[in-house]
Image (cartoon, grey):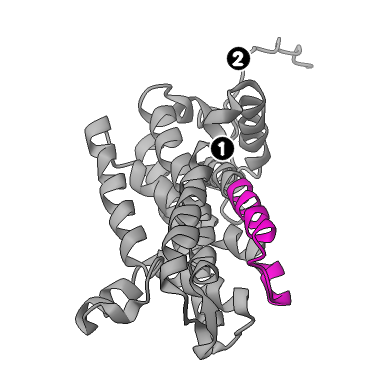
Amino acid sequence: MSVPDQPSVSKGPLLPEFPADRPLGAIYGRNARAVIERGFRVIARQNWAILVSGFFEPVLYLLAMGLGLGALVGEVSGPGGTSIPYTAYIAPALLATSAMNGAIYDSTWNVFFKLRFAKLYQAMLQTSLGPMDVALGEIFMALFRGFLYACGFMGVMLVMGLVTSPWAILMVPVALLIAVGFASVGMAVTSYLKSFQQMDVINFVMLPMFLFSATLYPIEVFPEALQWFIKAMPLWHGVELMRHLAVGFVSGATLGHALYFVVMTIFGVWFTTTRLRALFLR
């Protein structure tokens, strides 16, 4: 005896699921490009003056300290004991700072608004996007801002005649490495902050790190105990890495500085992904 076909029952739209047998399937939907595409659409519609505003601070430092104070300082000892003008000494450090500023501004204040006010990430994670998609997309956008700052500052250095080594061509990709390191950690830290008053902590940390990371004067001016603390800070490694490339002094220490940011990036992406998952996928 045949059984009549049962009418199909519509259960409504199904929520997207991540394949369990795929690596990182629980947190990664392989669609970070959607976050990136949205980021560029927003940039196309916003005031570009806001995007590039953080670029001018290092340039003004270069003009004031390099051309102003540099005329009184003269030449200083660079990497490997090379004697270089003071302007050429601080310019690579300010390029590293420029990349850091671009990444930090985008991965902190921008992320803070999306997280606490626009509630954008909550909406994203209701789609096929996973926490790692959101983390990678936002870090990429912060990296893009750092890239713009680095290219602009590199252009200023070229105009001022401060690029003298063929190794200097690597300063822009290294600026991207510095930017992605700061962006990945900055986004994770921002996820813990809940008010504008707490966001001031970021400036409280960034300004001293800029002043004490041997950007404007050699690290040897500090007491030895303080030097060890400074060498643990990420900006110091970025400054030293840039200076090595600027004068063509490439050694094992150069690779060590680069490796610092590789590890920082891996840790930052994992930290941010874990934090977003804890916040929204309980």
**Mark 1 lies on residue:** 52
Q: Quadrant of residue 112?
A: top left
Q: Which residues are magenta?
A: 147-170
Q: Which image quarter: residue 117?
A: top left
Which residue is disc 2 drawn over? 12
Amino acid beneath label 2: Gly
The kind of residue tagged 1 is Val
Q: Quadrant of the N terminus?
A: top right
Residues marked 2 and 1 touching at CB (< 8 Å) = no
What residue sits 43% from the left and 21% below the top?
Answer: 118
**The magenta stretch spans residue 151:** yes
Residue 180 location, x and y as percent?
A: 54, 55
Instruction: Give the camera-side residue of 176 and 75.
Output: 75
**Left or right of residue 50: residue 196:** left
Tell which of 253 and 54 is nearer to you: 54
Q: Is residue 115 magenta?
A: no
Q: Main secondary structure of the magenta part?
A: helix
Give the secondary structure at mark 1: helix
Q: Determine whether, in the image, residue 102 is placed left or right of residue 202.
A: right
Q: How many marks?
A: 2
Q: Closest to the observer: 160 or 124? A: 160
The C terminus lies in quadrant: top left
Is 178 in front, or is 71? 71
Residue at screen point 61% across, 85% down: 250
Question: Which numbered mark, 2 or 1, is in the foreground of this view?
Answer: 1
